[in-house]
């Protein structure tokens, strides 16, 4: 073989080696993972559909209790479990016996109680909060009231306002 032939062969081999190296060259690579998360809150709100608790006329000294019923409505975008409803003490507070009091704008007081399906309805102090599972869409929470008999209030119109709080 001639040197020329070896020269051509060496050049061809070098060219092939260069082309092969270019085609087989590996790129550097690195990977990492990211966490994906979301939080979806229970979404329940009171609606405007509240039925106030309004007692009929009370006769001073009457022996029987006077009863009435009211309600609040709650709309939930998803079902919610263990929702707690509590009732505050009212604008006029509580007496020594734990009853809430309506007043007549003066010194007159008329005792009353709120009752839910859990019993005497309150904030956990004198009474029990109501814990309830709510369905998606509308839920009605019934609140009963009693004006105990045997009271002797002054004449007049008696009122109070109680804050109902929902926690979930």
Image (cartoon, rainbow, N blue to C red):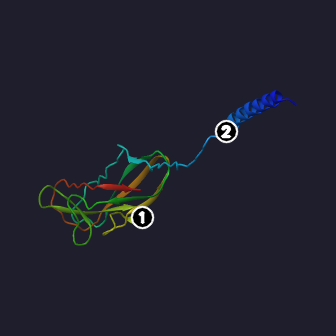
Write the residue at 70% across / 33% down.
18
Tell me the SS state at disc 1: loop
Q: Quadrant of the N terminus?
A: top right
User: Tag 2: Cα neighbours inside 10 Å, few (<14), some, or many (≥20)?
Assistant: few
Is residue 36 rendered to the left or right of residue 15? Answer: left
User: What number of labels is visible?
Assistant: 2
On the rendered structure, is 53 left or right of 136?
left
On residue 118, which mark appears?
1
**Residue found at the very far right of the displayed protein:** 1
Residue assigned mark 2 = 25
Q: Secondary structure at mark 2?
A: loop
Q: Quadrant of residue 97?
A: bottom left
Between 64 and 144, the one nearer to me in the picture: 144
Q: Position of residue 39 (x, y in %)?
A: 47, 50
Q: Residue furthest front?
A: 2
Tag nearer the camera, 2 or 1 = 2
Q: Is residue 45 above or below residue 109?
A: above
For the residue pair 25 and 66, the one nearer the viewer reads as: 25
Nearer-the-camera pick, 42 or 105: 42
Instruction: Please give the name of the residue rendered at 27% of the width and 56% of the height, measured from the top-left corner.
Output: 162
Q: Quadrant of the C terminus?
A: bottom left
Q: Residue at x 31, y 69 (%)?
A: 125
Give the percent coordinates (x, y) of residue 24.
Answer: 70, 38
**Foreground residue among 97 and 158:** 97
């Amino acid at each position: 073989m001639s040197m020329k032939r070896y020269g051509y062969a060496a050049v061809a081999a070098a060219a092939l080696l260069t082309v092969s190296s270019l085609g087989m060259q590996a790129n550097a690579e690195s990977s990492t993972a990211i966490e994906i998360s979301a939080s979806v809150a229970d979404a329940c709100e009171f609606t405007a559909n509240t039925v106030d608790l309004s007692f009929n006329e009370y006769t001073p000294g009457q022996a029987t209790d006077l009863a009435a019923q009211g309600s609040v409505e709650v709309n939930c975008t998803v079902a919610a479990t263990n929702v707690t409803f509590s009732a505050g003490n009212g604008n006029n507070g509580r007496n020594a016996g734990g009853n809430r009091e309506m007043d007549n704008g003066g010194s007159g007081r008329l005792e009353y109680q709120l009752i839910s399906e859990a019993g005497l309805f309150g904030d956990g102090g004198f009474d029990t909060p109501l814990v309830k599972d709510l369905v998606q869409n509308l839920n009605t929470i019934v609140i009963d009231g009693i004006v105990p008999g045997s009271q002797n209030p002054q004449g007049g119109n008696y009122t109070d306002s109680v804050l109902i709080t929902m926690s979930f």
